Image: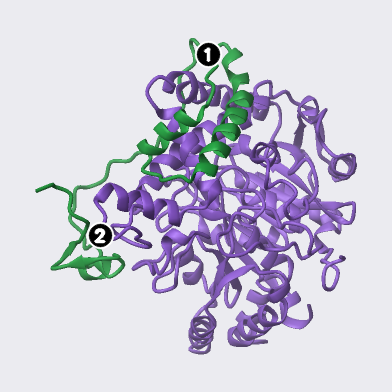
Amino acid sequence: MSGLTTFSATEIARRVAARDVSAEEVARAHLARIAEADGGIDAFLHVAAERAVAKAREVDAAIAAGGTAPPLAGVPVAVKDVLDIQDLPTTCGSRILDGYRPPFTATAVARLEAAGAVVLGKTNMDEFAMGSSTENSAFKPTRNPWARDRVPGGSSGGSAAAVAAGMAAAALGTDTGGSIRQPAAMCGVVGLKPTYGRVSRYGLVAFASSLDQIGPIARSVEDVARMAEALCGWDPRDATSARMDVPAFVSGLRADARGLRIGVPWKFLAAGVDEAIMTAFRAAIDAFRAAGAVVVEVDLPHVSHAIATYYIVATAEASSNLARYDGVRYGLRAGQGADLRRMYGETRDRGFGPEVKRRIILGTFVLSSGYYDAYYLRAQKVRTLIRRDFEQALTESDVIATPTTPSPAFRLGEKTADPLQMYLADIFTVPANLAGIPGLSLPCGLAEELPAGLQLLGRPFDEATLLRAGHAYQSVTNHHLARPPQGGSR
Amino acid sequence: MARVTVETVDHVAQLAHLSLTPEERETFARQLDEILAYAESIQALETHDVEPMSHAFTFEVMREDAPAPELPREQVLAAAPDAEGGLFRVPKVIGG
C-alpha cells in the first residue's frame, strides 16, 4: 500500500478540498489497488469503476466551480452488498437475488454521496448477513488481509477487509449481532454500530428488523466519526429512524479521557476469552487510566443469555423477512411451469444456502403454534432483562468496555461444520443489538500476530461519547496505525 | 424440552415454503436440536412480570397522510422474473 491508498478519509477529504489532489486521482488509485490486491482477498463482489470515476469527476467539478467542498470530498468508499444502489446489482451474497438491479438507492449511500464520497463497488458478505466469517457467501469466501488462511470475520467481512487492505478508505457495513464490529476487530480496523434508529434503513435488505443497523468502517475513530456525521439522521422513508438531533461528532473529539468513567464487566469476561486477547484488553484499560479515565466494575447479570435470546429473536424475524423471496417480484425463479407451491419451494431451495435455510427453519419453529410462548415470547422478555442490565450499568459508567471477540480471526473452515460454535463467537457483540445501544470496535494490539479488538458500548443516541473515548484511546496509542503485512503473513 | 426430529423439520419446512434434500433434513434436525438445547438456559429465568420487548425504542411513526410520487410501475416490474400487461405473472393458482 503506498501513496493515496494509505491516506485516511480525513486526509483525503482535506487534500481534495484544497485541490492538492483530485477526487478522480484518488478514485483511480484505489481502483488500481483493488485490481492489484483483491485477487488474493476477494473483498469485492462488484467493482463499479466507471461509475466511481464519473462520480469523482462530479466532485472535482463542483469544487472547481468554487463551491464549498463537502465533508467527505473524494473519499473512496466500499458498500456492503446488502445496500441498494440504483442500477448496480444487489446480491446480499445470495443466489436468490440473481440478476436483481434495484430501482432505488439506499438513503445511507445517498447521504455519503451527497457528502462527496465516491462509491467504488459492492463488498462480499455472509448470505443475507447471516454469519460471522463471510464463508456463507454464495459466491466466494473473503480472506483476512493479515493472514490469508484466516477469515475476515463477518458478516461485513468484505467491507472490513477492503478497508484493512487499503482498497477503500472507508466502507459501509451492517450490524445485526456484531457484523460491523466483529469483522472490524478481526481485520484491525474501526467499526461503529450506531444506536438502533440512528441511521435510515431505507434501501437496506432486511435480516432482523428490530436489530439491524447500518454503520461505518474506517481506519481511525476520527474517520468513523466523519462518516457517522454524514450517515446519521432522520429519514421520512424509514419509520424506524429516529427524529433526534445529530451532534457534530468530529469537532466533539478530544485527545484525553479525563472525567470518563469506563465500566468493565469483569465477571462476564472471566471465562472463554483467549489469554492473548485478554492481555491486549487489560493493556487498553490501563491506557484509558493513563489518559485520565476512571475505571469501575459493572455487572451485566443477564448477558450470559444473550446468544440464546439473539438466535431466537433474530431467526424469528429473519424467517418473516425472507418470506418475500418467492420468485414472483424479483431475483431467481425456479420450477417455472409447476404449480405455485412447487415454484415457491424450488425457488427457495435453489436460491438459499444452508445457513439461511437453517435460520429460516429455526425462526419458523420458534414462531410456530405450541412453541411461540416457550421460545419467542420468552426470548423477548429476556431481551428486556438484558436491556435493563445495560441501563443500570450505564448509570454507573459512561462507556462499557469489553473485548470485541473472544478470540482472533479463526481459520477458514474451522467453524463451518458446527453452527453453534460459530454463533458463540458473537458473545460480546450481540448484547448491544438486543439492547439497541451503540457499539464501537477499535484495534487494541495483536494477539498471536492477528488483530485484537476493543469494544466500547454506550448509552442510546450517545455515539458522541463512544467516539470521544475511542479517539482519546487512539491519541495515546498507535495500534490503529498497524497495517497488515505485505501479502498476508502466511 | 422440545426435541427436534426430522418430522418437525419437515413440518416447519412446509410452513416456510422450503424444499429440503434428505441430507438437509437430517442435518438440520440434529443441529436445531443442539441449538435449542443450548437455548434452554433462558427457560430457567424468572420472567413472569417482565414485559416482552419487540423494539429497542418506540418512535413517533405517524406521518401526514400526503400523497407522494412512488417508483414507476414499469421500473418495478422490470425486476420481475415474469411480468405481463402491468402485472406479475405466476404459475396457475386455481385448479380446473
Q: Is residue A436 above or below residue A141?
A: above
In the image, the chain rendered in purple is A
The residue positioned farthest toward the front in the image shown = B22
The three-letter code of the residue at mark 1 reads: Thr
Q: Are marks 2 and 1 on the same chain?
A: no
Which percent across, then down, holds residue A483? Answer: 82, 66
Please give the name of the residue rendered at 80% of the width and 28% of the height, measured from the top-left corner.
Answer: A266
> Which quarter shows the C terminus of chain A?
bottom right
Which percent across, then down, holds residue A25? Answer: 63, 87
Chain that bears disc 1: B
Q: Is residue A205 visible?
A: no
**Secondary element at image label 1:** loop
Residue under numbered circle 1 = B47
* Left or right of A334, for residue A53: right
Residue under numbered circle 2 = A337
Kindly report which numbered mark, 2 or 1, lies closer to the viewer in this rendering.
2
The three-letter code of the residue at mark 2 reads: Gly
Chain B takes which shade in the image? green
Chain that bears disc 2: A
* Left or right of A6, for residue A345: left
Give the crowd class for mark 1: few <14, some 14-19, many >=20 residues within 10 Å. some
Q: Is residue A263 visible?
A: yes
